Image (cartoon, helix red, strand yellow):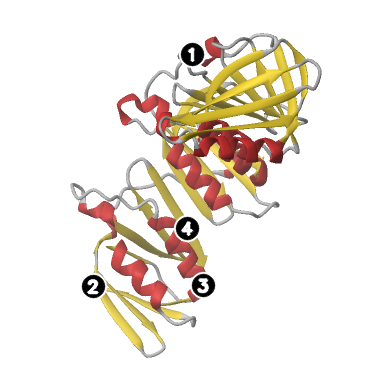
Amino acid sequence: MKIIVGHSETKRALTAVARSVSRRGDLPILTNICVHKGEGELTFSATDLVTAIQYTIPAQGEGSGMVCVPAMVFVEFVHSLPETDITLHLEDGKLSIHSGSFTATIQGARGEDFPTLPIFDSEKAMFIAGKTLRETIERVSLAASTDESRREMTGILLTYEKGVLSLVATDGYRLSKSMVSVDKSEGNMSFILPARSMMELARLIGENDKTLVGVIFQGSQVLFSIERVTLVSSLIDGQFPPYERILPGPPTTRLMVERDVLEKAVRLAGIFSRAVAGVVRLTVTPKKTPSLTLSSSIEQIGTQEGSIDASVEGEELVIALNSRYLLDAIHATKASQVALEFSGALKPCKISGIGEEGVFHIIMPVRLQG
């Protein structure tokens, strides 16, 4: 069977699906990319049984067929080919690749042995603007844990209720939440998806502001469709922490500051906090000249202190926070001004962008010594 495909489309598709190829050797078929020829199209698929990606591109050629080939060799060879059309031949369990004066034949495995992936049915889907979903994932995923001993905290909680989809992630030391309106009015649902799968979804959406993402909730899986790409993610079985308990009440101190000014001040303070778990001291002064002072020190090396202008309401406060968590929250904010709210030196700090409704970050404080 002879198939002709464009080099750029093939390269883009293989780059995407390769990120879901299994790195484990206990199931050799999962280290492959499945190549499936359909009517006027060619589909590449890969899965590690947690995340699966299918990417379909236009293709010339008659007939249909399927073969699985080792991902690493296939992807690297195609990436290195000249930027001309590629001719593929599927025959006797082998995949032959021709481009210009270059030819390769890869021994494959039976396509029937590759896990069957669910089919996306657009009639059952809700649709979300791609840019909105991508930005929401990027704002929240930063707070997800990487500790596999508590798998539910390595995921993002997705909850849908009354036309609002909310995403929440936490690692126990910080929390991020973002809510978006969705064009769907029936039913409520709540489940945990791996943060890695959601970050891959954000990467697939890319910078195309006009992309619509279809979402289907199907048993123990969720399907996302972006134009010619489908991502399938398994759910994480477990109970997400009752995060509402740590959400701070009405603030006793609130300040507003320019985002870029705050970022620079936190970054400078962080240089002198690396040896002490990234802890920086924030002093909020509401009287006379309202300001925020950030200070840090490294024993036997030195100290750092910087003050920035701020609009302050409420009580004077001294609190210690992790500088990296603070920077992550600032980076996730697109607004030109940032609000920081405090309910006491040992209560969580809430960070949000001025004008960004439904998005906030929570950072747990560090107890100051002495």
Q: Nearer the viewer, mark 3 or mark 1?
A: 1
Q: Is tag 3's residue or tag 1's residue first in the polypeptide sequence?
A: 3
Spot occupied by residue 197 in the image (x, y as percentages of width and height): 45, 41
Label 3 – label 1 distance at C-alpha: 46 Å
Q: Which of label 4 and label 1 is nearer to you?
A: 1
Using the numbered discs, state the Cα–Cα distance from disc 4 to disc 3 in whole angstroms.
13 Å
Does residue 62 sit above or below 215 in this rendering? below
Residue type at mark 3?
A: Ser
Lower position in the chain sequence, tag 2 or tag 1: 2
Q: Amino acid at mark 1?
A: Pro
| Tag in front: 4 or 2 | 4
- Which numbered mark, 2 or 1, is in the foreground of this view? 1
Q: Nearer the viewer, residue 248 or 104?
A: 248
Q: Position of residue 274 (x, y in %)?
A: 44, 35
Q: Dividing the picture into quarters, in which one does residue 91 lie?
A: bottom left
The residue furthest right is 288
Crowd around label 1: few <14 · some 14–19 · many ≥20 (10 Å):
few
Give the residue number, with chain letter if any, for mark 3.
8
Asked which secondary structure carries label 2, the reply is loop
Residue at coordinates 30% horizontally, 26% vertically from top-left? 149
Determine if residue 356 is in view.
no
Q: Looking at numbered disc 2 in the image, what kind of residue is underneath it?
A: Asp
Q: On the picture, is 313 further left or further right than 51?
A: right
Please rate how many residues cluster around mark 3, counting C-alpha atoms within 10 Å: few if below 14, some from 14 to 19, many from 20. Answer: some
Q: Between disc 4 and disc 1, whose residue precedes?
A: 4
The residue pinned by badge 4 equals 55
* Element assignment for label 1: loop
Residue highlighted by disc 1? 242
Residue in front for this viewpoint, 35 or 286: 286
Specify the label residue 92 is tagged with.
Answer: 2
